Amino acid sequence: MKRILGYLRRAVEDFNMIQEGDRIAVGISGGKDSLTLLKALKLYQYFSPVSFHIEAITITMGFDNFDVSPIEAFCKEIGVPYTVKHTLIGKIVFETRQEKNPCSLCARMRRGALHDAALELGCKKVALGHNLDDAIETFFLSLFYEGRFNTFSPVTYLDRKGITVIRPLIYAPEPEIIGVAKRYNLPVVPSPCPAAGHTQREEMKKLLRSLAKTFPDIRMRFLHALKSKNSRHLWD
């Protein structure tokens, strides 16, 4: 966890993610990344130079086999308020719309629900658990499927809703997050999504793992490239 906190602290400082008095909603999917982020942010509160408040929010998808009780118990244990917003997004995407490529619509609807829930709790910032591997995979997806160089930014301001999205784990490699989740026995809840493990992103994960076998420092090289002045259109 010490290394994860180091990555988080450096990202927060490099991109000025958190200011005095911020109310931050942490999106909790039940996966290793969002739970690690929540625990790390809670620990960071103890030595942060500014005071901030965090709330945990889970947006359910309407699937029957998604039990949030372990997450609820975890939030209670670490002293973070927890809100569950129930939706029918999964049923809309897979049953009503029968989307052939469901991920894009699903992501948009989940983001909208999460942002609305954050505003209801008085949070103008939303923290997501995207890590360094996610940024690289998004870069690959954009390159291979859209023919352009693009990935998400560490900080994004959404002017339509007045919300700032931050990604404090943007420097953290996924293998280290996996290690922390196992070491601290975080209550990871398997995704009930029918498409889980069968997406284009999963192919990019396999590609990155394969490249890392030949180039062990590839993640840090990508990070250096993303932060380079020559790449300011990516992480400006």
Image (spheres, rainbow, N blue to C red):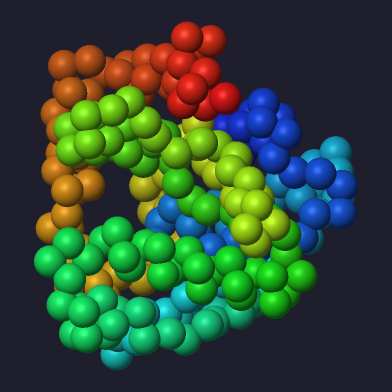
143 horizontally vs 184: left or right? left
Q: Nearer the viewer, residue 64 or 70?
A: 64
Residue at image location 37% in from the left, 47% down from the top: 178
The quarter in which the C terminus is drawn is top right
210 horizontally vs 218: left or right = left
| Residue 226 seen in the figure | yes
Instruction: Please tell me which residue is depicted at 53% across the width and 63% down the height of the picture.
Output: 27
Horizontal and vertical percent for residue 48?
80, 42
x, y percentage for residue 227?
51, 18
Camera-side residue: 5 or 230? 230
- Residue lying farthest front? 160
| Residue drawn at the location 14% of the way across and 29% of the way down | 210
Q: Position of residue 202 (x, y in %)?
A: 19, 48
Residue that appears at 47% across and 75% down: 59
Q: Is residue 206 left or right of residue 160?
A: left
Give whichever of 103, 11 is nearer the camera: 103
Task: Please tell me which residue lies in front, 180 or 221.
Answer: 221
Quadrant of the snapshot with the N terminus? top right
Farthest-out residue, bottom: 64
Q: Position of residue 37 (x, y in %)?
A: 55, 52
- Is residue 218 positioned above or below 78 on the image? above
Asked if residue 202 lies left or right of residue 132, the reply is left
Q: Measured along the vertical axis of the image, is residue 203 above or below residue 106?
A: above
Q: Is residue 2 visible?
A: no
